[in-house]
Amino acid sequence: MLPNLQPPWDDFNARAGREGWAAVCDPSLSFDSPQLAELLGIWRGVKCERLLPARADFTARTLKRHLKDIALIERLHEAGKPRRYRFRMIGRGQVRGEGGDATGKYLDEIIAPRFIASWYAAYDMALDAAVPLRFVSQFYSLGLDYMIAESLVAPLADAAGAPWGLLTSTVYVPRVG
C-alpha cells in the first residue's frame, strides 16, 4: 500500500469540512497579524538548523514583547492513557472568554467536548509534522462566538530534541456579518 502523499493540512481541512469544524489550516504562514509574523520569525531564529527549537531556548528575554500573548503547551503521554495537552504557561492576553487562566489545566478540561477533536488534530499535526502552522478559526466556545481567531501553532522540542509541545499565540478580531 502506498503511503498517504497528501500534506497533513489537506487532510485536516478535509476533515474540518466533513465534521463541521470552524478552523482552517493555512500552511503558507501568511499572517495578517504583524505580531504573529514577528513571533514566527523569533521561532525560526531560535530554531536555526535544528528540526525543532527547544522549549528551553525561549527565555523571557527572547519572548519579552510576546509574553502576555503566548501559551506554552506540553503534550503528555502516560503509559496506558491517551495523550493530553497541558497549558504550562499562558499569558494574560491569551486568557479569553469564560475559561479564565488555564495555566496548569489540561486542554480537555477547558474546551467543550464537541470541539476538542479539532484542537487535538491541530496540535498533533503541528507536532507530528514538526512545522509551524497558521490557523484561522471562528469561535463557537468560551463565550467568544463573535470572534475570528488567527493563530500560530509552532512545535517545540525537549532538551534531547524530541517533540515536547507547542508555542502558540492567537490574535482575535471581531467577526463581521
Image: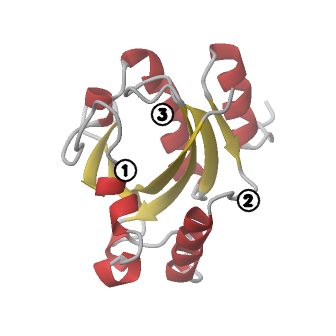
Residue 77 in percent (x, y) is at 30, 41
Quadrant position of residue 122: top right
Q: How is the image coloured?
A: secondary structure
Q: Residue at x 63, y 41 (%)?
A: 136
Disc 3 residue crowd, few under 14, some 14–19, many 20+, Cα 10 Å: some
Q: Which residue is mark 3?
A: 119
Q: Residue at x 61, y 26 (%)?
A: 22
The quadrant the C terminus occupies is top right
Give yes or no for contact between labels 2 and 3 (Cβ–Cβ under 8 Å). Answer: no
Q: Earlier in the sequence, mark 1 or mark 2?
A: 2
Circle 2 — which element? loop
- The three-letter code of the residue at mark 1 reads Gln
Instruction: Report, in whole angstroms, how far the alpha carbon at label 1 lies from the one at label 3.
Output: 16 Å
Q: Which residue is mark 2?
A: 30
Residue 124 in percent (x, y) is at 50, 42
Relative side of 163 to 24, left or right: left
Report if residue 81 is visible in the image.
no
Quadrant position of residue 12: top right
Instruction: Report, in whole angstroms, how far the alpha carbon at label 2 lies from the one at label 3.
Output: 21 Å
Relative side of 91 to 47, left or right: left
Relative side of 110 to 123, left or right: left
Q: Which residue is mark 1?
A: 94
Give yes or no for contact between labels 1 and 3 (Cβ–Cβ under 8 Å). Answer: no
Circle 3 — which element? helix
Q: Earlier in the sequence, mark 2 or mark 3?
A: 2
Q: Nearer the viewer, residue 172 or 112?
A: 172
Residue 113 in percent (x, y) is at 38, 17
Task: Tell me: residue 80, above or below residue 129.
Answer: above
